[in-house]
């Protein structure tokens, strides 16, 4: 960020156009990835146009929920089954960002996209997740018992 701000200050000095630093702070905080004019309007409403400063985004965001590894000896909850992968990913993201988190992943096979919440250590934890789905999202989850030894899930 220091390099990006230094480059912006250099552009401001070279062009003679005043930059709106409050707007710059807002744009950086929002990190939408959309170029935004941040110069103060000059005479005649013209703005200084320059190549946008590219910021490098981290591979994972600070505080981003992590879904635990798949375990065949754990309980899961089938939250939903979709035709559309985007809808499934959206629901998984919603569950992963619940407070407290309901860890969820999408398993896709045969054109179907299932959202599975879990892993849960026991049936009581899975039942609690079903209850939270019903209360928070008005969804009826289905508990899935641990898979027999040597079995693996299909999908991704």
Image (spheres, rainbow, N blue to C red):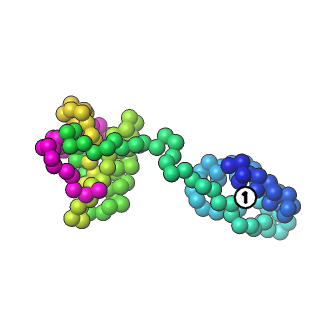
Query: Foreground: 87 or 4?
Result: 4
Q: Nearer the viewer, residue 1 or 103?
A: 1
Q: In the image, is residue 4 above or below residue 76? A: below
Q: Is residue 108 left or right of residue 92?
A: left
Q: Is residue 58 above or below residue 62?
A: below
Can see residue 144?
Answer: yes
Q: Magenta segment range?
A: 129-156
Residue at (27% x, 55% y) in the render: 107
Residue 17: image x %, image y %? 83, 61
Residue 62 is left or right of residue 96, and the answer is: right
Is residue 23 covered in magenta? no
Q: Which secondary structure, mark 1?
A: loop
Q: Quadrant of residue 124?
A: top left
Task: Give the residue number, with chain letter if any, for mark 1.
Answer: 38
Q: Is residue 132 magenta?
A: yes
Q: Is residue 139 left or right of residue 91?
A: left
Image x and y of residue 65, in percent: 42, 42
Residue sticking out furthest to the front: 150
Q: Quadrant of the C terminus?
A: bottom left
What percent of the width, then of the height, locates residue 54? 65, 60
Displayed quadrant of residue 49? bottom right
């Amino acid at each position: 960020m220091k390099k990006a701000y230094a480059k912006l200050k250099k552009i401001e000095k070279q062009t003679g156009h005043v930059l709106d630093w409050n707007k710059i702070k807002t744009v950086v905080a929002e990190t939408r990835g959309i170029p935004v004019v941040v110069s103060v309007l000059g005479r005649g409403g013209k703005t200084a146009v320059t190549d946008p400063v590219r910021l490098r985004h981290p591979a994972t965001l600070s505080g981003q929920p992590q879904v635990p590894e798949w375990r065949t000896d754990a309980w899961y909850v089938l939250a939903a089954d979709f035709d559309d992968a985007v809808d499934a990913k959206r629901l998984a993201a919603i569950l992963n960002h619940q407070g407290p988190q309901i860890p969820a992943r999408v398993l896709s096979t045969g054109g179907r996209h299932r959202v599975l919440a879990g892993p849960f250590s026991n049936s009581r934890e899975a039942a609690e997740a079903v209850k939270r789905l019903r209360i928070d999202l008005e969804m009826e989850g289905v508990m899935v018992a641990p898979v027999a030894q040597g079995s693996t899930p299909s999908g991704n």
